[in-house]
Image (cartoon, rainbow, N blue to C red):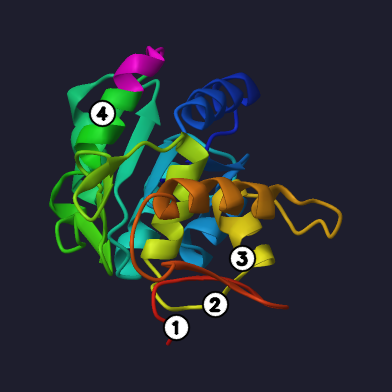
Amino acid sequence: MRILVIEDDAATADYVAKGLREAGHVVEVARDGKDGLFLALSETFDAIISDRMLPGPDGLSILRALRASGKTVPVLMLTALGEVDARVEGLDAGANDYLVKPFAFSELRARLDAMTRQPATAGEPTVLRVEDLEMDLLKRTVRRAGKLVELLPTEWRLLEYMMRRPGQVLTRTMLLEHVWDFNFDPTTNVVDVHVSRLRQKIEHGFDGPPVLQTVRGAGYALGRRV
């Protein structure tokens, strides 16, 4: 998943971001409410983790702005305020869950997993299919022609991004920004290396035409091109 963390405390932000990245997620960090609000409204995330008390717009203001704009992205609110009224206020503003500081990362991850399976994302498909390739987002499995394919976390993110855009030509810049979460570096071959590894896993030993295509001079496409 692509997750936005809005947290002004550097130690907490680094702790959360490190744990999420180790779990295979792409993480964007905003250090104040202004940057957090801008990213939350202008970019697409699968989940947002936001502190309640922030410089600039606070967490509740960001949450209300998100919901007013029609965005239904799941939001986990972090707070040092443990009072029931404070939690109720956050939930009423549109938070999907609340976690009181200090917290264990294992609890944050469990709440995040549960939150992203709630009705806020129920309208989205839980199984992606491109030709005979199938990705089950809840079971975290990939199969081709019914045969299980084992993927590493980065390979999973790469394939998920491509399966959500079947037939589209995806440039290396797009893949770097959305799968690896950093800007284009013309000297890096990280995309080509990972695409090659992914191709080996989903093509080798299977009959039929390749499902993952190289579009010369442009990038890559999964499935029949649009």
Which labelled disc corresponds to residue 225?
A: 1
Q: Tell me the mark number nearer the camera, choosing from 2 and 3.
A: 2
Q: Which residue is mark 4?
A: 111
SS at mark 1 in the image: loop
SS at mark 4 in the image: helix
Q: Residue furthest right?
A: 187
Asked whether 209 or 35 is in front, the reply is 209
Residue 114 on image: x %, y %: 20, 34
- Residue type beneath disc 4: Arg
Q: Tell me the mark number nearer the camera, choosing from 4 and 2.
A: 2
Task: Quadrant for residue 65, please give it.
Answer: bottom left
Label 1 vs 2, first from the N-terminus: 2
SS at mark 2 in the image: loop
Label 3 with label 4: CB-CB less than 8 Å: no
Badge 4: how crowded within 10 Å, few (<14), some, or many (20+)? Answer: some
Q: Alpha-carbon distance for marks 2 and 3? A: 10 Å
Asked whether 152 or 143 is in front, the reply is 143
Task: Quadrant for residue 124, please give it.
Answer: bottom left
Label 1 with label 2: CB-CB less than 8 Å: yes
Residue 62 inside the magenta-drawn segment:
no
Q: Which residue is mark 2?
A: 169
- Residue type beneath disc 3: Met
Q: Which residue is mark 3?
A: 174
